[in-house]
Image: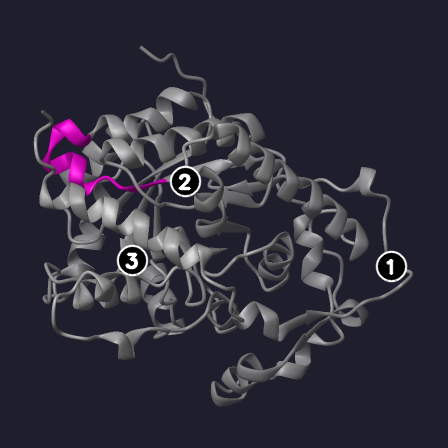
Amino acid sequence: MSEPMSPSGQRKDDHLRLAQEQQTAPPVRNDFDEVQLVHHALAGLDADRVHLDVEVLGHAWSAPLYINGMTGGTERTARVNRALAIAARETGIAMASGSVSIALDDPSAAPGFRVIREENPDGFVMANLGIGRSGDEARRAVELLGADALQIHLNSVQETVMPEGTRDFSRWPHALEEVVAASPVPVLVKEVGFGLSRRTLSRLHDMGVQIADVSGVGGTDFARIENARRPGEDYSFLAGHGQSAVCSLLDAPDPAPLLLASGGVRTPLDVVKSLALGARAAGVAGVFLRAAYDGDPEHATTVIRGWLSQLTELLALFGADSPAALSRTDLLLRGRVREFCELSGLDPTSFARRGDLSPAPDPLPTTATPPRSRTTT
């Protein structure tokens, strides 16, 4: 007879199930639908000229696409992580784990995360840890996965709705500074689906954070997930709270950390829009969770390969021979996104003629190093 699951383990499995339920619900519009790429019928390229590689944190990523942090720590979630890790290995894209906090507190949960590195020994892997942990715990999280970077997630809205969540956010800035100073690898700060504001990005830059994932509203909604776990109090009014990835990218300050985008990325076209708005790469969780939910790496691999093929074809369609060249694409901002720009003092019309005015971008650095080889024991 198996031992009963810990409360933390039960929460992990609940999150996985409820996130999958959101993915199988009828699709809804989000702010990516308010961004239109202007079609220029004679602007296309030969797809053979297109390259997808980008430089991130001194490493060459083969594509501006990565599997974002989702899960881990239980037998059920380990099967999903294994399928995703194999898919990352077979397609060459980067991958983040779910929060490893459970494994730091309970070593028996560690195999559900180690499987990522075991199945993908040479890939770019990011460990994930909630804010508020110590510098020593950050080092342990990196060691657990042999990680190339450490994601620290900010989730104050989720914690507010979570029945067992914290209500004291006052220590978070100091804790983040401690982790940035102590981590042996670069620290990537991300939201969990509520967006990073201009003020937050400026503060992260001042703290020495090199890279941030704006992770906006429009994808998996952790306010809804945690509300579904609450017996009694109803926080449904927080569903949809926050800024989208689109609005977070538009309002990003200069200087700011290098920006990644996630939250509501449903198609390769959403990836293209993220890149055109200034992200270096886009992270996908929900769609890839659906592909790996049954633990089938072949299905997940097929889905990701399809995205990479379509990304190449879309760049050729829009006349961009590289992800960086999308910064010259003409964009029309409509609806809620246009309203956000106007209320924030931004000019939404300035994106409509970029191809006429913008010089070609500088080529990406060629000194990036590939992920280091590892020997799995």
Would you say 282 lies left or right of 190 here? right
Q: Which residue is mark 2?
A: 293
Name which residue type carries label 3. Met
- In the rendering, at what x and y percent does residue 364 appear? 64, 44
Image quarter in which the N terminus is found: top left
Instruction: Name the front one of labels 2 and 1.
Output: 2
The first of marks 2 and 1 along the sequence is 1
Q: Main secondary structure of the magenta part?
A: helix
Mark linked to residue 369: none
Residue, x 27% and y 59% (percent of image)? 154
What distance separates the C-alpha of mark 2 from that of mark 3? 37 Å
Q: Nearer the viewer, residue 346 or 319?
A: 319
Tell me the crowding category of disc 3: few under 14, some 14 to 19, or many 20 or more residues within 10 angstroms, Cα based: some
* Secondary structure under the numbered disc 2 in the rendered image: loop
Name which residue type carries label 2. Tyr
Q: Is residue 27 inside the magenta stretch? A: no
Would you say 349 lies left or right of 183 here? right
Q: Which residue is mark 3?
A: 207
Q: Is residue 376 above or below residue 282?
A: above
What distance separates the C-alpha of mark 2 from that of mark 1? 39 Å
Q: Which residue is mark 1?
A: 43
- In the rendering, at what x and y percent does residue 354 appear? 74, 70
- Any part of residue 134 in sight: no
Q: Is residue 313 above or below residue 277?
A: above
* Secondary structure under the numbered disc 1 in the rendered image: loop
Q: Which residues are magenta?
A: 97-109
Residue, x 71% and y 40% (percent of image)? 51
- Any part of residue 206 in sight: yes
What distance separates the C-alpha of mark 3 from that of mark 1? 42 Å
* Secondary structure under the numbered disc 3 in the rendered image: loop
